[in-house]
Image (cartoon, grey):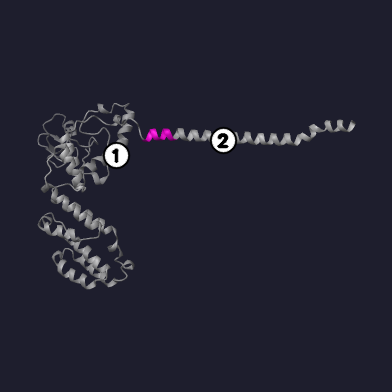
Amino acid sequence: GGGEAMEGDGAPESTLPATQEALARLREGVRAASAAAGDTKESLSAVAKLGKMVDKAMPSDLGRAVTPVRMDPALVNRAVLDHLLRTGKLEVARTLAEEAGEELDEEELRPFAEMVEVAQGLRARDLGPAKAWAARNEAGLKGIGSDVGFLIARMEFLQMARGGRVLDAVMLARGSFDQYLPARLPDVQRLMGCLAFVGRLERSPYASFFDEGEWARLLDRLSSDGSRLLGLPKDLPLGVCVEAGVKALPSLLKFATVMQGRIGEWGSKTALPVEIDLGPERRYHSVFVCPVSREQASADNPPMMMQCGHVLCEHSLKKVSRGAARFKCPYCPVEVSVHGSLRLHL
């Protein structure tokens, strides 16, 4: 009986290791839960920041940055049609013209269809359509001072050299390059020089002549001169409008935020409320800044050339004159007059 009592009294001691192990596991669970909570908190914080960044980068109300503009549907349709024609989407242009009630005859489509054929040929490394197009428009191309004829012959020469057809390249040079001399003599000399490296052109001083980008540059030049033949600008008007809008939108949104949405209250409807830098490739007119007021000339405040040859903006000219019939130019001692000054058109 005494031994059984001793065994019963020691039972709690035998369960101590199990209890300690359970506590250790519980502590590990608590630590894991705490770590998970911390990770969850960081994740929630990151999601909240992401939402704010998205809201900041993509405001929901873009209408705050623009003013209502009435657009003639016929002009909009015409602009889209011209864009489709110049980008080679002829079938889409036909469908749009039919649905919008616009006139679009096949004769109007013909020059654009020819340019599509030329572009497809160049992308397939086929100069045939380009040569045929240049031959048909030879007189017009000469009239605008285009040299695409030489560029096409140059590309054909280079392809012959790349293929090891030296004799064919020489015969082409004799028959095609003479008409472009002496204006293109340096170019012809370099082309003839590359024949000495046939078989190792990639390691020659003329390796750049055979860059694949030459095809894209030739296509760009053909497209540009083709547009000039048709009296069209080099750049696509609709594309330029979209590009300008994308570049201007962030500045206009910031301005609208500062003005608390009153962006439509600026005075002039022909100018933006803030200056937008579209880059040098989008500068189509000269810019004049008045040396007196430091303001840029505009239609309401045009540059005026005084009799001495110096130029001020009209508002500055009237301020300097102070209503007098004659006054001294602020930049030279010559006496000038407001009425005798000439408006300059930029």
Q: Check disc 2 and report its element: helix, strand or loop.
A: helix
Query: In this view of the protein, which residue sits in the foreground, 69 or 127?
Result: 127
Looking at the rendered image, the disc whose residue lies closer to the viewer, 1 or 2, is 2
Rendered residue at 18%/71% (across/down): 171
Q: Residues within 10 Å of mark 1 (few under 14, many from 20)?
A: few
Q: Is residue 190 visible?
A: no
Q: Is residue 226 magenta?
A: no
User: Relative to residue 172, is residue 30 depicted above or below?
Assistant: above
Residue where numbered disc 1 is placed: 246
Residue 101, picture quadrant: top left
Q: Is residue 238 visible?
A: yes
Secondary structure character of the magenta stretch overall: helix
Q: Is residue 55 magenta?
A: yes
What segment is highlighted magenta in the picture?
A: 50-57
The location of residue 41, given as percent across then percent down, is 52, 33
Rendered residue at 25%/65% (across/down): 159
Query: In this view of the protein, which residue sits in the foreground, 222 or 99?
Result: 99
Q: Is residue 329 left or right of residue 206?
A: left
Give the residue type that dot 2 points to. Answer: Ala
Q: Residue furthest front?
A: 1
Rendered residue at 25%/46% (across/down): 281
Residue where numbered disc 2 is placed: 36
Query: In this view of the protein, which residue sits in the foreground, 139 or 331?
Result: 139
Q: Residues within 10 Å of mark 2 (few under 14, many from 20)?
A: few
Give the residue type that dot 1 points to. Answer: Val
